[in-house]
Image: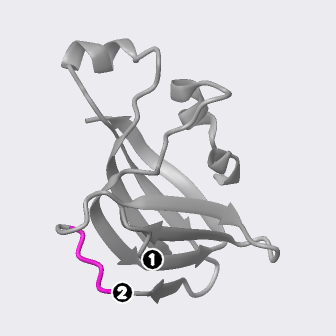
Amino acid sequence: MWTDLLIDNKPVRAIYGENNEPDLSDVEMQKISIGQYGLVLELSGFNLPNPLPKRWAERGLTNGCCALHFYNKGETSIYRRANLNIHQYKHMSIHIKEEPNGKKSAIITDQHDNCYLEIEADFVSMNKIGGC
């Protein structure tokens, strides 16, 4: 499970349970930011947990949303493969795995499997997980 690669997966597991995780195969990228410590992807549109948290149900939320942070001790490696226009390509897939060198990598593709971005990082965390 990709959530096993997070620095701390307890918040995700508290919402989704031990054997479930957000499905990142068809998400909307709301924002991409590059900062001092790495890259942040703000996502929405992934599956909601079952059962739905009470406050999410009360608010009528229909999608999950979060921010994935890719941290590095040194430089952040970002490889742009094509023109990434997040307003044009809403249905993106994010594949996160661990490389043989211990780094975490993410490959972002569109609905046609065109690769738009590759990221390599020392650590990955999921922040601001919630409903939207």
Task: Locate residue 111: give its quadrant.
Answer: bottom left
Categorize mark 1 by other alpha carbons within 10 Å: few (<14), some (14-19), many (20+): some
Query: What residue is at 67 percent from the left and 62 percent from the top?
Result: 97
Query: What residue is at 51 percent from the left and 78 percent from the top?
Result: 118
Rendered view: 132 above or below 102: above
Q: 48 left or right of 126?
A: left
Give the position of the N terminus as an image quadrant. top right
Rendering coords of residue 71 (x, y %)? 56, 70
Query: What residue is at 82 percent from the left and 74 percent from the top?
Result: 100
| Colour scheme of the picture | one colour
Q: Furthest residue to the right?
A: 100
Secondary element type, mark 1: strand
Categorize mark 2 by other alpha carbons within 10 Å: few (<14), some (14-19), many (20+): few
User: Between residues 55 and 113, which one lies in front from this camera angle?
Assistant: 113
Rendered view: 33 above or below 128: below
Answer with mark 2 or mark 1, whichever residue precedes in sequence. 2
Rendering coords of residue 44 (x, y %)? 31, 47
Q: Amino acid at mark 2?
A: Ala
Do the numbered discs 2 and 1 sit on residues whose CB atoms are within 8 Å? yes
For residue 132, the mark is none
Q: Amino acid at mark 1?
A: Cys
Rendered view: 126 above or below 83: above
Q: How far is the residue under mark 2 from the one under mark 1? A: 7 Å
**Dominant secondary structure, magenta:** loop
Q: Mark 2 sits on what residue?
A: 82
Rendering coords of residue 27 (x, y %)? 35, 51
Tell me, yes or no, whether the highlighted magenta stretch contains residue 111. Answer: no
Q: Mark 1 sits on what residue?
A: 115
| Magenta-drawn segment | 82-86
Task: Locate residue 80: give its quadrant.
Answer: bottom left
User: Between residues 96 and 9, which one lies in front from this camera angle?
Assistant: 96
